[in-house]
Image: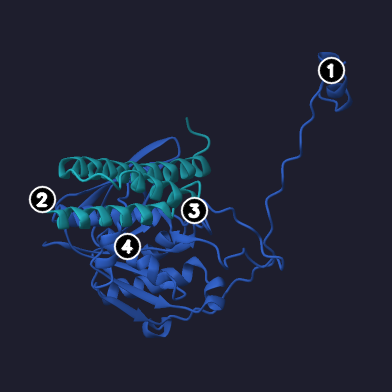
Chain colours: A blue, B cyan
Amino acid sequence: MSGLRVLVGCKRVIDYAVKIRVRPDKMGVVTDGVKHSMNPFDEIAIEEAVRLKEKKLASEVIAVSCGPPQCQETLRTAMAMGADKSIHVEIDLATYEKMSPLHVAKLLSKIAQDNKVDLILLGKQAIDGDCNQTGQMTAALLDWPQATCASSIEKTNGDIKVVKEVDGGLETVKVKLPAVVTTDLRLNEPRYATLPNIMKAKKKPMEKKKPVDYGVDIDPRQKVVSVEDPPTREAGQKLDNVQDLVTKLKEQGLLTS
Amino acid sequence: MSAQNLHSKVIHLYKTLLYLGREYPKGYDYFRTKLKNAFMKNREVTDPKEIEMLISRGEYIVKELEALYMLRKYRTLKKRYYSDET
């Protein structure tokens, strides 16, 4: 088999350093005027794909993002890091807010078939929804093997060996290609998209698509009931001496007298 | 190295640093002021060797900043998602 064709998903999320605020109507979080960037786990996926290409194991790296027009910036970053081309599935903001991992998985599986992809690399989860579902669903829809939470990927003949992070240790699996692999934090250290590379990425091809082009219906199946802040921790109390502490603890029934 | 070439290298370095400054934890304005001061401090330097040295120092800072951002992101994520590990 000559070089693999790798498809990488990259989601545009609110930047990891930004403090998230809930919208007053409690139906979502504030996104207007908030710094966005590529989901860090997807950055790791892009980096891994680019490394596969640098090792001559991959022939083409395609970055894909679904969402509002601003996603194109995320795709530029992906291309600046080394992806060859990108596909932007344009979805308006109102619809996008109601999208769930299943819709994205459907789009990704169609894109993978259209582009004759051998390997799909995705972040294990996005830092906004924290769903950890898209990769698994994509694999199921395509009926491809999946290896989730990868901390190392190695290509052998016709298949790939993936070390997965599982509870309490590591698990090594061998999957046949084509396959879906989702990346964990320790897989690699993503490179920085430098300014000259961002400029060069503007010349790389970007396809613009709509969900209807792939025949995917993105009507919401779920309804957001309410979005709320996590409960704030109650402030503690400072006591002057041990006697007070013992009295307090007894009051709370935490100490038997 | 011709003076013209050095000049463009300095400009390029400045632009790269400005671009990196957008993510600086203390804010872009803080970074830009500091950056401008640092460059202005050396405006009188004319010796090509010394300029080369200053450029390489700047390039070192570029590398340090990239590493800083990467580490910061890694640490935040580790704290957020892998809190129960040592």
Q: Tell me the amino acid under the disc marked 1.
A: Val
Q: How crowded is mark 3: few (under 14 residues within 10 Å), some or many (20 or more)?
A: few
Q: Label 2, on which residue?
A: B1
From the top left corner, tell me how far across and down residue A21 is, in percent: 64, 58
In the rendered structure, find residue A78 and report the number of the disc placed on it.
4
Identify the subunit bearing mark 4.
A
Say whether residue A225 is left or right of residue A109. right
Secondary element at image label 1: helix
Of A123 and B2, nearer the camera is B2
Q: Tell me the amino acid under the disc marked 4.
A: Ala
* Distance between mark 3 and mark 2 Cα atoms: 33 Å
Q: Residue at x 57, y 66 (%)?
A: A31
From the top left corner, tell me how far across and down residue A132 is, in percent: 47, 56
Q: Residue at x 50, y 44 (%)?
A: B81
From the top left corner, tell me how far across and down residue A8 is, in percent: 32, 63
Q: Tell me the amino acid under the disc marked 2.
A: Met
Q: Residues within 10 Å of mark 1 (few under 14, many from 20)?
A: some
Count of marks placed on residues = 4
